[in-house]
Image: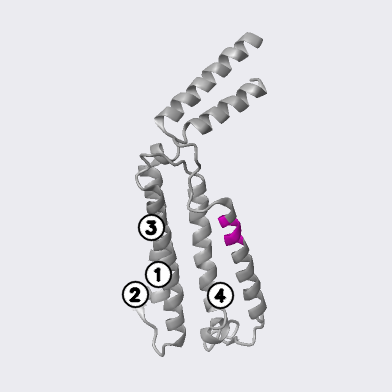
Amino acid sequence: MPKSLSNHGLRHLSEGGRGDGQSSGFLKPLGLFILLVSVWVVLGVAIHLRDGSTKYRSAHADHTEMHTGGSGELRHGHILLVGGLFGVLEVAIFVTLLSLGLRRRKDSGGQGWLLFFGGVVCAGVMTALFLSYRQYMTASEPSFLGPFPTPTSIMIFGIWLAPVIFVVLYVVFFDRWIVSKDDLKRFKHILEDRRRRAGKTS
């Protein structure tokens, strides 16, 4: 296939499916860059605050060949807020990257608000995880949510399941947000044109 046909066809397919000619997303690439810089800053602060020592560990009462981590408050209390902020920023980057890969159409079905809702849910679950762990570290008796300690339950049933929102959005709105029927027809036309040209040059 001639290079000019390939570039023209792919450009035509991409531009034709955008509806209003604008790429979708909550934030422009500059906003994504700001989020990335924020993550770097948070990681730098975490590295600076973490002493990296093993002074909190102690021998296990029953299994002498093992060690226990000691007080979670002593080990993690000083960087817990930084860790929570890092988690929320990761969710923001994830949602932003998803939005940049979508196409904005008049019939997008509230694309931006639905993605924003999914991001808020994931960030809320992440925040709940860190708040519950903070309480778990200082409590005299561990609290349980279902069969596990509260932070563990939030990790298993919250962190793992919250992204299902984006899977559902992907399945339901695939033909409006990702590739529409018109896009498939356009792509098929490009392939047929490619085969015709290849047949003429062979």
**Mark 1 and mark 2 residues within 8 Å of each other at the beta carbon:** yes
Q: Which residue is mark 1?
A: 154
Q: Is residue 190 above or below residue 105?
A: above
Proximity of marks 1 and 3: CB atoms separated by less than 8 Å? no
Spot occupied by residue 32 in the image (x, y as percentages of width and height): 57, 56
First reached walking from the N terminus: tag 3 or tag 4:
4
Are the residues flagged by discs 3 and 2 in contact, CB closer than 8 Å? no
Residue neighbourhood size for the residue with mark 4, other residues' Cα within 10 Å, grouped as few (<14), some (14–19), many (≥20): some
Expressed as whole percent of the image width and height from the top left, the position of residue 131 reads 43, 77
Q: Is residue 50 visible?
A: no
Tell me the residue that label 2 is attached to: 145
Instruction: From the viewer's side, name the closer residue of 48 and 31.
Output: 31
- Mark number displayed over residue 82: 4
Residue span colored magenta: 31-36
Q: What's the amino acid at mark 2?
A: Leu
Q: Quadrant of residue 141?
A: bottom left
Identified at 53% across, 83% down, the residue is 77
Instruction: Residue at 54% x, 51% y: name it.
Output: 28
Q: Residues within 10 Å of mark 3 (few under 14, many from 20)?
A: few
Mark 4: secondary structure:
helix
The relative height of residue 38 versus residue 59 in the rendered view (above or below) is above
Which residue is located at x 39 percent, y 65 percent?
158
For label 3, the residue is 117
- The residue at the point 44 percent across, 35 percent down is 19
Nearer mark to the viewer, of 3 and 2: 3
Q: Residues within 10 Å of mark 1 (few under 14, many from 20)?
A: many
- State the quadrant of the C terminus: top right
Which of marks 2 and 3 precedes in the sequence?
3
Name the quadrant of the N terminus: top right
**Residue type at numbered disc 4:** Val
> What's the distance in space between the residues labelled 1 and 4, CA to CA?
19 Å
